[in-house]
Amino acid sequence: MENTLRDPQKLPGWGIDANPDNDPTYPMREPRLNVSQDPDSKHRPASLQPVDVEVLKSIERPNVSAVFGESSPPVGLSGMIRRFAFKYSESHYGHWLPLLLADRVNVVEGIIEDLGQGKVPNIFAEKGYAAEWKHNRTAFVAKMATIAAVTIGSILILTRDNEKKHKYRY
Amino acid sequence: MLAMEYRGPKRVRATQKPMPEIKHPQDAIVRVTRSCICGSDLHLYNGNVPDTRVGMTFGHEFCGIVEEVGPEVTKVKVGDHVLVPFNVACGECHFCKQGMFGNCHESNTQASAVGGIFGYSHTAGGYNGGQAEYARVPYANVGPTVIPEGMDPDDAVLLTDVVPTGYQAAEMAGIQKGDTVVVFGAGPVGIMAARCCWLFGAGRVIIIDKEDYRLEFARNYANCEAYNFEKDMDDPVVFIKKQTDFMGADCVIDAVGAEAAGNAMQTITGRKLLLQAGSATAMHWAINSVKKGGVVSVVGVYGPTDNLIPMGNVLNKGLTIRGNQASVKRLLPRLIEHVQNGVINPKALITHRIPLEEVADGYRLFSAKLDNCIKPLLVFPSANI
């Protein structure tokens, strides 16, 4: 591929937002406020969302934020793990690693939940394999064949080991 | 209502969920007319962001029609067609007052490092997102912005994230006229960042990726030089040094984040074993390929834990690293102007329209970079626009 470009200065808008004063504090373009000098630093919105679901709160803040999301409150074993995680600050592995563990436990809980509702999750559809089949068939088939071969091979090896283990048994 | 639902790493589905309700006097309920899958949704999709719970609806790039408002909502009314910035922001806290709407202190209980983001795990507030027929939009006096008359909703939906994030990437790079800027990542945000670099007067813009179709798109859309790090060079850092008389680029933008390829150790420890908060390959290259005293601008998303980057070089080279979630509300007036004047053409990024019912295929298509996908847009059965 060749990089044959037009003169950038002839592009619409070239340089129209150039700003010689753009310095490293730029994202805070408004006059910088020192927290202790900001008379409104403890200001809170007039209305607070009622806390009618369990909301896990970071110990690095004093209160529940004025609004919050209510999706998927903590439940089950994953919920217990999440509650444990929130005993630690965001700068602690004790916070993030349990949350990652809880996410994986939550996946199993989700499958159990589906089955409990009489619904067998369609993993093929949920993983979007139809798109792979349509647009990437050769690689997809090769990948699936590899997984199948490795799985079958592993089963065969494990089975053979079992036979060897008992070869002297009468 | 029909909504996307997360079921586990690389598993999502469209399912019926309860309608959202007004929970706070400044809430609005929006009937979604456009919603995109974002590159940063893929971090959630791949299970890389802690506290991503089964049952959640993703989606932080959406626009829609206001169906219901809480008693304190005065800035939008029922029937308005609004674009919804991805940040949930109160507009009144210490940070919002400084224009840092991506860092609101009253929208995320679960984490203090980031403000609330629609449909972006409980680490970003636990809000259900806009990949659904309806969405709850808190602080409706602050975020939702009425789409100007005559603006194509396809343009409007990209003003909720892609355009402001790409623009802020260029802005944070501190570009001065004539600067050489390198952009790592030719996804939608990287392509938009490359386009926006010219608005700040860049003299040369180079974009680096490994997908030829994306590089070709970037070359045409952003008029930038485009190179494949797997085919055109042995070492991206040495390549950039050679391109800049061995000085390094004036500014470098990391528009990749946690899903970066290109370094086996980073890929294994960051993406496969989750021993770090994603693969920091692009950030590593950015620090090492920018000039001494240069600026690295970070809009690629990483997880909240740790990453392996060469901090010693940041010190020894005297670098400035600037990063943030885009402050959409701050940037919108200028960006709307750019779209209306034809300076930026956001909708040209949209390459796929996928029915919400087939959202799982959409995620797979985008994640695996199938069918030359740049930007997928979800189509809603109830949108009618």
Image (spheres, coloured by chain):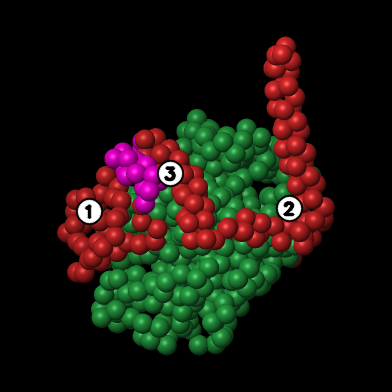
Task: Measuring from the top left, give residue B207's x and y in whole percent.
Answer: 67, 53
Q: Position of residue B338 (x, y in %)?
A: 54, 75
Residue tagged 2: B211
| Residue A102: mark in rendering | 3
| CB-based contact (under 8 Å), mark 1 and mark 2 | no
Q: Which residues are magenta?
A: A75-92
| SS at mark 3 in the image | helix
Of marks 1 and 2, the one in the foreground: 1
- From the viewer's perspective, is residue A51 above or below residue B136? above
Residue at far front of view: A170
Q: Are marks 3 and 2 in contact (CB under 8 Å)?
A: no
Tell me the distance, in whole angstroms, between the alpha carbons under discs 1 and 2: 46 Å
Q: Quadrant of the C terminus of chain B?
A: bottom right
Position of residue B253 measured from the top left corner of the image (x, y, whole percent): 57, 51
Q: Is residue B163 above or below residue B215?
A: below
Identify the secondary structure beneath mark 2: loop
Q: Residues under labels 3 and 2: Cα distance?
A: 34 Å
Q: Residues within 10 Å of mark 3 (few under 14, many from 20)?
A: many
Q: Amino acid at mark 3?
A: Ala
Give B161 or B167, whichever is nearer the viewer: B161
**Magenta span includes A81:** yes
